[in-house]
Image (spheres, helix red, strand yellow):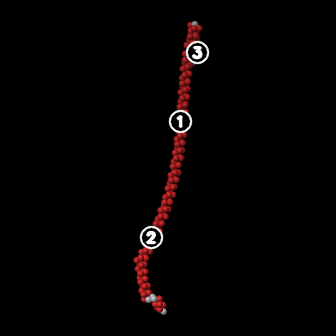
């Protein structure tokens, strides 16, 4: 009956079986020669695409890490530079203070030396003035003694003065 049903449709079972065998052989040949390499090529392409994506992600992560590292290094260098500048300012201020102290000390020494020299000059001038005053007083006294006192009185006066001087010296 099954033959009658297929034969009624115009299908011959031997031909159908032959076509099934042909289709199976063709399917196996195509699977072996076309589908297998095609599927393998597609799998390779998918694997390459996955590797490319993974590599791209890795590169992007490394790039982000490098950018972060560069930013950190820049910030560190900036902080270090600020530290160095601050230290240089502190050292410059210390050097300034040392120079000012030294200048003050030198100015004080110069002033002290000038005061000593002025005092010495004043004492020298005073001594010179005293000498001139003594000479002038002596000359004036001699002149007055010569004009107002006689020779005898002059000798008595000189004797008394010499006696007074001997007492002073001893």
Left or right for 129, reference 43:
right
Q: Going from the N terminus, do you reach mark 3 or mark 1 first?
A: 1
Give the crowd class for mark 1: few <14, some 14-19, many >=20 residues within 10 Å.
few
Q: Is 146 left or right of 10, judged from the image as shown?
A: right
What residue sits right under mark 1 in the picture?
A: 103
Which sits earlier in the primary sequence, circle 2 or circle 1? 2
Q: Which residue is labeled 2 in the image?
A: 45
Q: Residue, x 53% and y 31% (percent of image)?
A: 110
In which quadrant of the rendered view does residue 126 lie?
top right
Vertical position of residue 39 compared to residue 59: above or below: below
**Which of the two residues, 153 or 143, is positioned nearer the viewer here?**
143
Within 10 angstroms of label 3, few (less than 14), some, or many (20 or more) residues? few
Residue 56, position as x, y percentages in the image:
47, 64
At x 57% / y 13%, what residue is drawn? 140
**Which residue is identified by label 3?**
164
Q: Secondary structure under badge 1?
A: helix
Distance (Cα) linking label 3 and label 1: 57 Å
Position of residue 162 measured from the top left corner of the image (x, y, whole percent): 56, 14
Q: What element carries label 3?
A: helix
Q: How far apart are marks 2 and 1 (CA)?
A: 84 Å
Q: Dot 2: what SS?
A: helix
The residue at 56%/7% (across/down) is 151
**Image location (x, y in percent) of residue 80:** 51, 50
């Amino acid at each position: 009956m099954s033959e009658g049903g297929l034969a009624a449709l115009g299908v011959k079972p031997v031909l159908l079986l032959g076509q099934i065998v042909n289709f199976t052989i063709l399917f196996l040949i195509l699977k072996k020669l076309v589908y297998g390499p095609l599927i393998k090529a597609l799998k390779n392409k998918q694997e390459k695409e996955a590797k490319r994506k993974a590599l791209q992600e890795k590169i992007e992560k490394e790039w982000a890490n490098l950018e972060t590292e560069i930013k950190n290094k820049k910030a560190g260098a900036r902080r270090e530079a600020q530290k160095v500048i601050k230290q240089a300012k502190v050292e410059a201020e210390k050097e300034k203070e040392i120079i000012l102290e030294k200048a003050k000390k030198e100015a004080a020494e110069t002033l002290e030396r000038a005061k000593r020299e002025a005092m010495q000059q004043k004492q020298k001038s005073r001594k010179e003035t005293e000498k001139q005053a003594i000479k002038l007083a002596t000359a004036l006294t001699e002149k007055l003694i010569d004009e107002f006192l006689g020779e005898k009185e002059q000798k008595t006066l000189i004797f008394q003065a010499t006696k007074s001087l001997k007492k002073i010296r001893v």
